[in-house]
Image (cartoon, grey):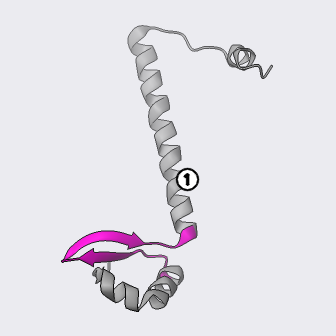
Amino acid sequence: MTQPISVSKARRDLARVIDDVRANHEPVFLSRRGKRVAAVVDADDYERMRDLAEDMADIRAAEQAREEMRRTGEAPIPWDEVKADLGLA
């Protein structure tokens, strides 16, 4: 990982920072007073990360639901019943 660059340097060299991020697919971290405050990432890479984070949240929610069903002994609701309740059947 590269060292963070200051916000003021990034402002001066914004076109180069963006070109580097797009070419290398590595984030560039920005710092202010020696502390990381932001990251510049390629837009497509960001979209993929966001999609993966959403998928992981869905997986965790499903795991929690299955665990709750095991604890309570509750049976799953059949898909056909869910569709009918939602007016999709």
**Residue 70 at what x, y percent from top left?**
42, 15
Crowd tier of the residue under label 1, counting other residues whose Cα lies within 10 Å: few below 14, some 14–19, many 20 or above? few
User: From the image, which quarter does the C terminus lie in?
Assistant: top right
Viewer-proximal residue, 23 or 86? 86
Residue extent of the magenta highlight:
24-43
Residue 37, placed above or below residue 12: above
Q: Image point 53% across, 67% down: which residue?
A: 45
Q: Is residue 8 left or right of residue 73?
A: left
Residue at the (24%, 76%) spot, across then down: 32
Residue 30 in magenta stretch: yes
Q: Could you say which quadrant of the image residue 28 lies in? A: bottom left
Which quarter of the rendering shows the N terminus? bottom left
Q: Position of residue 9 (x, y in %)?
A: 33, 88
x 51%, y 64%: residue: 46
Q: How many marks?
A: 1
- Asked whether, in this view, residue 77 is left or right of residue 21, the answer is right
The three-letter code of the residue at mark 1 reads: Asp
> In this rendering, is residue 61 above or below 16?
above
Residue 43 point in image, percent of width and height: 55, 69
Does 73 sit above or below residue 79? Answer: above
Quarter of image, res 73: top left
Location of mark 1 (residue): 51
Tell which residue pokes out farthest to the left in this image.
33
Looking at the picture, how far across and down is residue 2, in whole percent?
Answer: 31, 81
Residue at 71 percent of width and 20 percent of height: 86
The one of 86 and 65 positioned closer to us in this rendering: 86
Helix, strand or loop under label 1? helix
